[in-house]
Image (cartoon, rainbow, N blue to C red):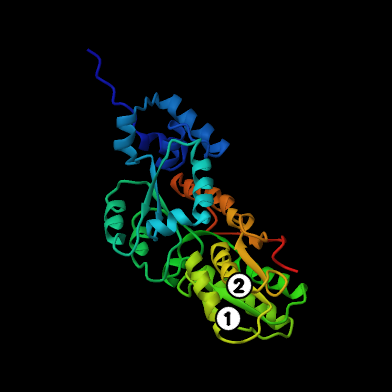
Amino acid sequence: MTPATTAATIEEVAAAAGVSRSTVSRVVNGSTSVSPAALEAVNQAIAKLKYVPNRAARTLASRTTNAVALVVPEDPTRFFGDPYFASVVGGIYSRLAATPYVLNVFLASDDQGDKTTTYLRGGNVDGAMIVSHHARDSYVEQIADSVPVVFAGRPTQPDVASRSYYVDVDNVLGGRLGTQELIDAGRTRIATIAGPADMPPGVDRLIGFNAALADAGLEPSGCVVGDFSEQGGAAAMRELLAGGGAIDGVFVANDLMARGAMAVLSEAGLRVPGDVSVVGFDDSVVATQVTPQLSTVRQPSFQQGELMVDVLLGLLAGEGADRVTIVDPEMVTRDSVR
């Protein structure tokens, strides 16, 4: 009798091809996120070693789940009520559609962070993407220590930011663009409704606002911090008006808050843009649902979602990726500025 031969393992294929085990896994799963050179090397090694994969063996050998997580540290009302999230998720879903990965979404508000972290650290996903994180969301560091993670935006914790992968929009530039739109329209008493101070977009857009005013030799006519919700924008606008200062322009850190602000201006008998010009941020569907239609800074959130997946797939494939990816915003002028 001839001795039985031992079946080749995924590790042996990886060694023969000179690639990582995760790259071999991606090839046998039919992923397109593998370089042509790596694809050829893996296929040659598979043929030489007569490697015959099956799904159960692949899972045990590579310890992959074919699942990735999207973690959103927000409550359901915020997640489902803000068009920004729909756009980012659309980009993520579009890019994952051609891969074997399924997407698990976790709404990890304050009381759900530990539960989400425990689940993700239990080997239930291969990697994670984190969107809309706050300084208080310390549990994201534990996730980043357990699986490959890509953030939407610069992580709030400096130690996490220094070693993390993230895809961000140039929010400082966006703040400048939105404020400059008001300056170019001849507005000189310009206030802002800023985003939360514990989130990098809120901080960076405010930096851009102040920088544009300083370059024009202008002083801010007021600053109130909102929470990125429509109700928060309305409350902030009421506070600005109650301050008593004359305002002829408002830069608002997102479109939802801008809609709330415009409603309050209308209630106060102030015309947009006749009395007060308004600029938002996002270029979400909200911008064309208000009257007058909103001038806003477009951030390519759908593209941001796609790029996050590209970075994560690169990490999972063992091929590396750029640690920081920055996309540029652009100004979209409509009817709320004159």
- Write down the quadrant of residue 135 in the picture: bottom left
**Left or right of 314 in this view: 113:** left
Local secondary structure at mark 2: helix
What amino acid type is highlighted by mark number 1? Leu
Q: Residue at x 52, y 40 (%)?
A: 33
- Write down the quadrant of residue 22 in the picture: top left
Q: Which residue is mark 2?
A: 265
Placement of 10 over or under 249, stated as above or below: above
The location of residue 181, given as percent across then percent down, is 72, 70
The location of residue 166, given as percent across then percent down, is 50, 59
Placement of 128 over or under 211, stated as above or below: above
**Left or right of 254 in this view: 102:** left
Between residues 250 and 219, which one lies in front from this camera angle? 250
Which image quarter is the N terminus in? top left
Q: Is residue 243 visible?
A: yes
Q: Residues within 10 Å of mark 1 (few under 14, many from 20)?
A: some
Q: Residue at x 52, y 46 (%)?
A: 90
Q: Residue at x 44, y 46 (%)?
A: 316
Dots 1, 2 in contact, CB < 8 A: yes
Q: Residue at x 69, y 65 (%)?
A: 336
Local secondary structure at mark 1: helix
Outermost residue toward the left?
1
The location of residue 28, given as percent across then percent down, is 43, 31
What amino acid type is highlighted by mark number 2? Leu
Q: Is residue 329 visible?
A: no
Q: Residues within 10 Å of mark 2 (few under 14, many from 20)?
A: some
Label 1, label 2: how many angstroms apart (C-alpha)?
9 Å
**Left or right of 329 in this view: 231:** left
Q: Which residue is mark 1?
A: 241
Closer to the chain start, of discs 1 and 2, is 1
